[in-house]
Image: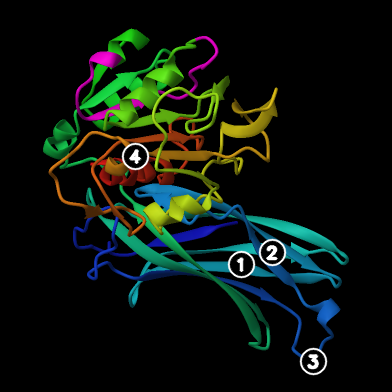
Amino acid sequence: MMVCQMVPRLTATRSRCVTPSSTSIWASIVVVCLGSWSWGMGPAEKVELVPLMLPRTLFADSVCAVSIRLRSQEYRAGKLVWQLAGGSRTLFSGEVAATIEANSESIVPIRIPIPPVRDGVGLETRLQLQYSSATGHSQSFQQSLWILSRNPFIGKSQWLEKLNITLFDPQGRTRASFESAGIPFRQVREVAALKNVESGIVVVGEGVSLNVYASLWDALTTLAERGLQAICFAPSEGRVDLPGTRSSVGRKPSSIALRHSDVILEFDKRLDWRAWSKDARLSVGGLDIDTSRGQVVGEFVLNDSSWPWIEVRYSQESGGVISNEPKTQDTYGAAISSAGRLIVCGFGVVEFWDSNPSSRYFLTSLFEALD
């Protein structure tokens, strides 16, 4: 049996989506499991308390369903009490019976209502799990948690228009996500049409085969050489010549970076790459590097060793378009020119659009970095 109680709603001050505001409201979720062990018992007799697949980011105005794993070598009977609080106020609370058989584990599901927040607001919370005995002894676990509104692009229509996004998306899934979020774009249906793009950001939608569209890779590298910003989301397959190698055609880039999931937190430290999707998948594509007949080649595949983030930069000094604009600070804090860049992102941004807010807010930060 679960008992749930709701108390007055907490309000928050509007803040930017990427950087937490100093006026963000701290909250805490306290889960207390009452059992029957004491500190005098040996380590083997203590209860292990672990939340399973607990996300660090959550959609506002939703329900967080999370399972708590309890393990013990002794029989335990108690109850799991949880509380969602903001500051000194309790937002929701509830309790559920929790019994652990000897030398076994018990999975206790709880459902925590997540309060609504205004558009553009990120509410930072803190989750604390605490197991307490009948005599009052306890142990605890804590984790930060962010509650985010569903659409990070609300109120940014003018900025999005200025990005001048051109979309090539044969699969159609990226187009659907952009339309649902109110992201304006101009769609092209042929690779050849990309050569006519003169400014803005070129986006290739998720799931494109670089084998089927054999000229697409050269078109993207050419755009970056000309000083444009290009993003290719999770190509499904394709064997390509890496820029700057002997087999490649065109100017050499100033740098090539291969990264894993650590790059996500450099865009926005709130985002949860560990629970990006409901089944804990993050990448839906990546780059394998190999040699063939003495040449370095890249192949887009999905395996544990592939690189999900490839970033190719062309600076002014490497032959990119000359710009009179001053150098600025990019997401990584390094001074860069306004010259071109090609990013291949294997993280499932569109694939997991509705699973967790992290993918949507990552896209926002990515657009800001390329602006």
Mark pair 2, 4: CA separation: 64 Å
Q: Which mark is residue 318?
A: 4
In x, y percent, where is residue 92?
41, 63
Of the numbered discs 4 and 3, the one sitting upstream in the chain is 3
| Disc 3 target residue | 40
Mark pair 2, 1: CA separation: 6 Å
When the figure is inspected, residue 86 is found, relative to residue 189, above or below; the finding is: below
Amino acid carrying mark 4 in the image:
Ser
Amino acid carrying mark 2 in the image:
Ala
Residues 68 and 347: in front is: 347
Mark pair 1, 3: CA separation: 22 Å
Of the numbered discs 2 and 1, the one sitting upstream in the chain is 1
Does residue 8 appear in this view?
A: yes
Mark pair 3, 2: CA separation: 22 Å
When the figure is inspected, residue 328 is found, relative to residue 151, above or below; the finding is: below
Q: Which mark is residue 98?
A: 2
Residues 233 and 156: in front is: 233
| Disc 1 target residue | 80
Mark pair 4, 3: CA separation: 68 Å
Quadrant, the N terminus: bottom right
Of the numbered discs 3 and 2, the one sitting upstream in the chain is 3
Q: Single out the residue that lies furthest toward the bottom.
A: 40
Amino acid carrying mark 1 in the image:
Leu
Q: Mark 2–mark 1 contact, CB under 8 Å?
A: yes
Amino acid carrying mark 3 in the image:
Gly
Q: Is residue 225 magenta?
A: no
Q: Which residues are magenta?
A: 195-212
| Magenta span dominant secondary structure | loop
When the figure is inspected, residue 250 is found, relative to residue 25, above or below; the finding is: above
When the figure is inspected, residue 73 is found, relative to residue 170, above or below; the finding is: below
Q: Mark 4–mark 3 contact, CB under 8 Å?
A: no
Does residue 204 appear in this view?
A: no
